[in-house]
Image (cartoon, coloured by chain):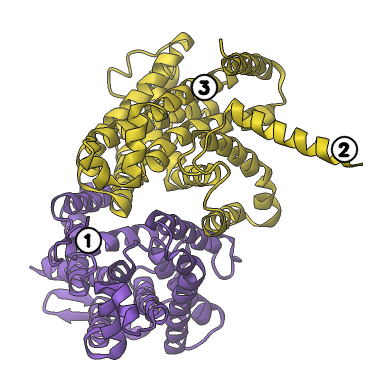
Amino acid sequence: MAPYVQQLFNGLTLGSLYALLAIGYTMVYGILRFINFAHGEIFMFAGYWALLWFAVLKFPWWAAAVLAVAITGLMGVIIERLAYRPLRHAPRISVFITAMGVSILLGNTIIVLPDWWAGGRQKPFPTPPAIMTRIFQLGDVRIQGVTIWVPLIAIACLLGLLLLIYRTKVGRAMRAIATDLEITALMGANINRIISYTFLVGSLLAAVAGILWGCRYPRLQWDLGLLPGLRSFTAAVVGGIGNITGAMLGGFLIGLGEIAVVAFLPHLSGLRDAFIFAILILFLLVRPTGLLGKPLKEKV
Amino acid sequence: MKPNRILTVLFLLGLALFAWWGDARMDRLLWRILNLGAIYAIAAVGYTVINGITGQFSLGPHGFMLLGAYFTTLLILPLEQKRAVWIFDPLVPPFSQFSLPESGFVLALVAGGVVAVLAAVVVGVPALRALRGDYLAIATLGFGEIIFLLVANLRGLTNGAMGIKGIPFYTNLKWAVGALVVLTYAAVRLKNSSFGRALRAIREDELAAESMGINVFRHKFLAFMFSAFCAGVAGGLMATLIGTITPDLFRFFVTFYLLMIIVLGGLGSISGAIVGGFIFATVFEALRFIDTAVVPGMRMVVFALLLILLMLFFRRGLFGREEFSWDWIGRGASRVWRWAWAKMSSF
């Protein structure tokens, strides 16, 4: 029994990280109908910002985390302003290519940054505060503190997000844009500001995920964003892209599934991403609207 | 014979002479750049047929190149080298039993292309039927990663992450440029046929094309197979140019290079893909100093910035959707001549 409980906690931890990341994909897709390919790199950058403030500049933990999250959120807004907004009326493929360019730019920027901060080699993430590393013992089940705190923090963020989306004016505007961008503009909403907010929120959540990821898997590398990014995108598709609760659900499902493969079929763990891509492709083919998404009719 | 056709024949003759001369006595660095340029151009021609002309955004060519590279290598690697490379997991038959001599190189290249096409059938039947736009892009990216994971894990066939060493250096300008000419010819014939017009109709408006009676799936599928074949051949040529392959040789960054090439040349222009391929190979080599003099990795930063700037300010590319033609050169030349004549007579 004990290993199952432990793996369940591992799965929930990974799943909550994917859920946080998947929100960013799904919000941007819901509003602008394009896949923000650079989202994974934003997540990766957050870990490096935390590393800079905490390990290099010796800030206290809480300050380093807050600063890292804030800077990463700002990065998302700036990227949207400089790279995506000028292409808002261009073909969607152009925006997608640009997003790929941004993704590769961010990843390789890490490589060229100086060694005391980043660089091409793996960097150890600083040891998180003691509360994260403590081990809780419940009978014969040993649970690391981090696998309790990460899901808790993630769930708190997700609840905050739901409040923002369903209980504030900005959130209402976001939902309105997702339904129809032009009509919302006609109603007097400032589209550009709302889209900036969307990128801000998505990047903030990605930043939280990035720092928590560092606490859970304390290694940073320049290409860290790619695979978690694609897995979270899969989570967003599984949940139904454009649907925020769906993205959360998909994130937890993908995280639990991945841990299940790694824990119970260890000889196949080298191919775990192949499974995830297979799930992605299967969903895209069989049920492109995901578990919770509504079918979209094509306009002629 | 029309004068344009004579010009084309003369050009091809000149190209053949140049390749023959280049293989014999060209400066090795320049020779290598030209080979790389031709290989990139081959892959880019195929890529622009599916991405630019048909408008179906695929992100999988690196997977097809990987397949082509490994299959060609499996066919032509000498037997004693095969015994030396596969130490931990022995190579599976039939590949452990035979190896093609150099005269079979063209066969091995075509076989590499065919294997890529087979993979494209597996990918394309579901993906092209159901997906388009950025969904198709992500799905093909996923397939490309699956191919990579399979190549990295099927050690009995690929020797896994350790890669394969000692591949004979068969690629030279005759082969690379020859393959480029043949595949370009095929692509141009494809583009200018009714088939190609149907592809462009699909790019402009899929629904309208379908209601005009075009079998959308069949057209997309054939364009996709053509692009996979080009990628497979390019992969095989690359393997026999470099001499060592690992699964990491064709990761996502290769698709990124190809995307840059066709965006620079003009999405949908075959001439643009070729010119872009050679420009890319040259610039990539010329900027090598950035990696050595500044910081390793800086070159990719520059290239990524370049791609973003291209998309923001120069989306048309060098050729737009136009193609090179002798008439085009003629018109340009006569315009320059008239301009110069007017300038001179005004003195």
Secondary structure, mark 1, is helix
Instruction: Give the residue at mark 3.
Output: B181
> Which mark is nearer the camera, 1 or 3?
3
Chain identifier of the purple chain:
A
Nearer mark to the viewer, of 2 and 3: 2
Residue B89 in view of the camera: no
Q: Is residue A49 above or below residue A44?
A: below
Q: Are marks 2 and 3 in contact (CB under 8 Å)?
A: no
* Spatial separation of the CA atoms under disc 2 and disc 3: 41 Å
Helix, strand or loop at mark 3: helix
Q: CA distance from mark 1 to mark 2?
A: 66 Å
Front-most of B110 and A214? B110
Q: Give how far across and how far down residue B93 sits, in percent.
A: 27, 19
Residue at x 45% of width, y 76% of height: A77
> Does residue B23 appear in this view?
yes
Chain B: colour as depicted? yellow
Which quadrant: the C terminus of chain A?
bottom left
**Toward which corner of the image does residue B265 lie, by quadrant?**
top right
For image coordinates 44% across by 40% down, the residue present is B250
> What type is the residue that disc 3 sits on?
Val
Name which of mark 2 and mark 3 comes first in the sequence: 3
Q: Chain of mark 2?
A: B
- Residue A282, position in %: x, y? 17, 50
State which mark lies toward you, 1 or 2.
Answer: 2
| Residue occupied by mark 1 | A237
Q: Amino acid at mark 2?
A: Met
Which quadrant of the figure has residue B318?
top right
